[in-house]
Image: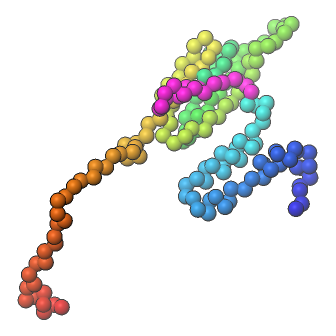
Amino acid sequence: MLIPPTLWLLPLEDWIMRTFDLTPLFRSTVGFDHLSRMMDTAMRLDDAALSYPPYNIEKLDEDNYRITMAVAGFSQDDLTLTAQDNTLLVTGHSRKDDSGVHYLHRGIAGRSFERRFELADHIRVEGAALVDGLLHIDLVREVPEAMKPRTITIGRTLAPKAIEAKPETDEARKAA
């Protein structure tokens, strides 16, 4: 097996995970092609980009979730939330002009960011609030009635219904 030169510097476990092929799985499944796109996107992500801004994902109950992002220094006007298909995009644009400020230590990052969250099917963004430098995004799972499990009652009949034949008419005999 020939290993490409670009993979020579990667640890073996990274090389194995980055070359995992899902093609055999797609031969017997329908509608899961988005999984390969999600895995490709996850492999292309930079670890440094994942650290800013920090965030938590909470499960509040069976159908409610909350994403909380630490966005100190950003106002409501600096933040944009966009929900499209199964993706939630949170962007922050820093509008501060620090040209006249001399910092001895700068520990509060005020740089622009773009964070994408892949949402599962039937997850909807219910609302968002910016409180004390934390952006809270509430999500709710709304499963359609047709997809919810339902109980089917099993009825009892005392005797099977018999199907009776209708008497044959002269016209039906001639047609046969």
Does the magenta-highlighted stretch encompass residue 94? no
Residue plotted at (57% across, 13% down): 131
Q: Nearer the viewer, residue 70 or 58?
A: 58
How many numbered discs? 0
Q: Is residue 89 left or right of residue 94?
A: left
Q: Nearer the viewer, residue 176 or 85?
A: 176
Q: Position of residue 54 (x, y in %)?
A: 69, 23
Q: Position of residue 113 (x, y in %)?
A: 71, 27
Residue plotted at (55% across, 40% down): 120
Q: Is residue 21 left or right of residue 6?
A: left
Quadrant hosting residue 163:
bottom left
Residue plotted at (61% across, 11% down): 132
Q: Could one spot residue 77 in this view of the protein? A: no
Quadrant hosting residue 74:
top right
Q: Is 61 above or below relative to 32?
A: above
Q: Could one spot residue 108 in this view of the protein? A: yes
Q: Position of residue 71 (x, y in %)?
A: 66, 18
**What's the magenta region?**
51-67
Q: Is residue 100 left or right of residue 94?
A: right
Q: Nearer the viewer, residue 139 or 155?
A: 155
Residue plotted at (18% across, 91% down): 176
Q: Is 86 above or below relative to 134?
A: below
Quadrant hosting residue 75:
top right
